[in-house]
């Protein structure tokens, strides 16, 4: 028998880890680059977000500044777009692109975008599944309990499904952001390419997370197969 964290399937995680580190480096590099490029309209992230929200009749959605770097997100429970300090107050290409992306989520919420609704519905079960999946799986592995491993696999599958549903949500929000910024005059035509590069770099982190989740699930299934038999 092998140790649960250093078994023959562990090698599957290596390319996923490399991909994850690459994606993180890509978004950090893009942010570092485009946070130094001012947009010609002179708008900061908060101003951009507010104007887009008002343009779409969403004056009830608030904008708040939060701590951290690239900690930006939209909270559908409170209808608040939260922007990190440099995105909120900066007038860079990165600032307006990220702010518009988060507003894209608010617009999705306002329009009842189906993938976003599904993701929100999954949050509770996924949080529970993510907390319990690995402990149950590895306890089952250590104590030779295939049934417990099966439960862990099922629970972890919820997390995988969540990552997969997240992809169209994020890509859609980015596409909305670029379209709005370009067609409504928030950025000049030559800046649109830069904004898209910023958001595309951020999107790779979601692809990497989904890839890691899928490979981890495959690893669990292979380990379960090595166990064989039933209780």
Image (cartoon, rainbow, N blue to C red):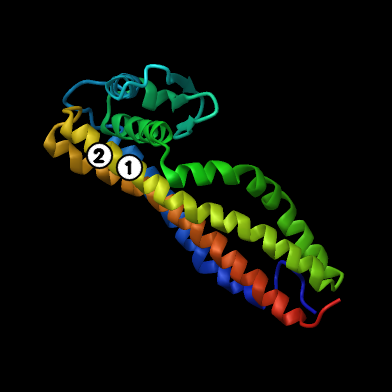
- Residue drawn at x 76%, y 82% as measured from the top left: 228
Residue 204, given in percent of the width and then of the height, sits at 40, 53
The secondary element bearing badge 2 is classed as helix
Which corner quadrant holds the C terminus? bottom right
Residue 2, given in percent of the width and then of the height, sits at 77, 76
Which corner quadrant holds the N terminus? bottom right
Question: Badge 2, how many Cα within 10 Å: few under 14, some, many 20+?
Answer: many
Work out whether 17 lies above or below 102.
Answer: below
- Residue drawn at x 23%, y 34% as measured from the top left: 180
Closer to us: 29 or 111: 111
Q: Is residue 183 left or right of residue 45?
A: left
Work out whether 166 lies above or below 188.
Answer: below
Q: Is residue 134 left or right of residue 142?
A: left
> Residue 38's image quarter?
top left
Given the current orientation, which residue lies at the most extreme left position? 189
> Residue 151's image quarter?
bottom right
Closer to us: 18 or 219: 219
Answer yes or no: do the residues labelled 1 and 2 have beta carbons within 8 Å?
A: yes
Res. 33 mark: none
Residue 120, given in percent of the width and then of the height, sits at 54, 41
Please give the residue where the numbered disc 2 appears in the rendered image.
178
Disc 1 to disc 2, how far (Cα)? Answer: 6 Å
Q: Is residue 210 left or right of residue 55?
A: right
Please give the residue where the numbered disc 1 appears in the rendered image.
174
The secondary element bearing badge 1 is classed as helix
Closer to us: 136 or 29: 136
- Residue drawn at x 40%, y 35% as measured from the top left: 105
């Amino acid at each position: 028998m092998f140790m649960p964290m250093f078994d023959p399937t562990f090698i599957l995680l290596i390319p996923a880890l490399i991909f994850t580190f690459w994606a993180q480096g890509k978004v950090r590099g893009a942010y570092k680059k485009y946070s130094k490029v001012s947009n010609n309209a002179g708008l900061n992230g908060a101003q951009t977000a507010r104007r887009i929200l008002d343009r779409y009749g969403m004056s009830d959605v608030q904008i708040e500044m939060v701590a951290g770097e690239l900690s930006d997100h939209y909270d559908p429970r409170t209808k608040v777009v939260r922007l990190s300090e440099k995105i909120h107050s900066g007038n860079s290409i990165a600032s307006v692109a990220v702010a518009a992306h988060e507003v894209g989520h608010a617009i999705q919420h306002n329009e009842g975008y189906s993938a976003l609704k599904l993701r929100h519905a999954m949050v509770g079960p996924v949080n529970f599944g993510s907390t319990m999946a690995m402990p149950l799986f590895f306890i089952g592995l250590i104590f030779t309990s295939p049934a417990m491993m099966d439960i862990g696999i099922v629970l972890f599958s919820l997390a995988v499904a969540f990552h997969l549903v997240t992809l169209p949500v994020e890509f859609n929000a980015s596409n909305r952001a670029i379209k709005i910024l370009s067609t409504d005059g928030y950025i000049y035509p030559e800046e649109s390419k830069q904004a898209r590069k910023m958001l595309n770099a951020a999107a790779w982190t979601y692809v990497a997370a989904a890839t890691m989740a899928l490979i981890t699930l495959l690893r669990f299934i292979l380990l379960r197969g090595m166990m064989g038999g039933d209780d």
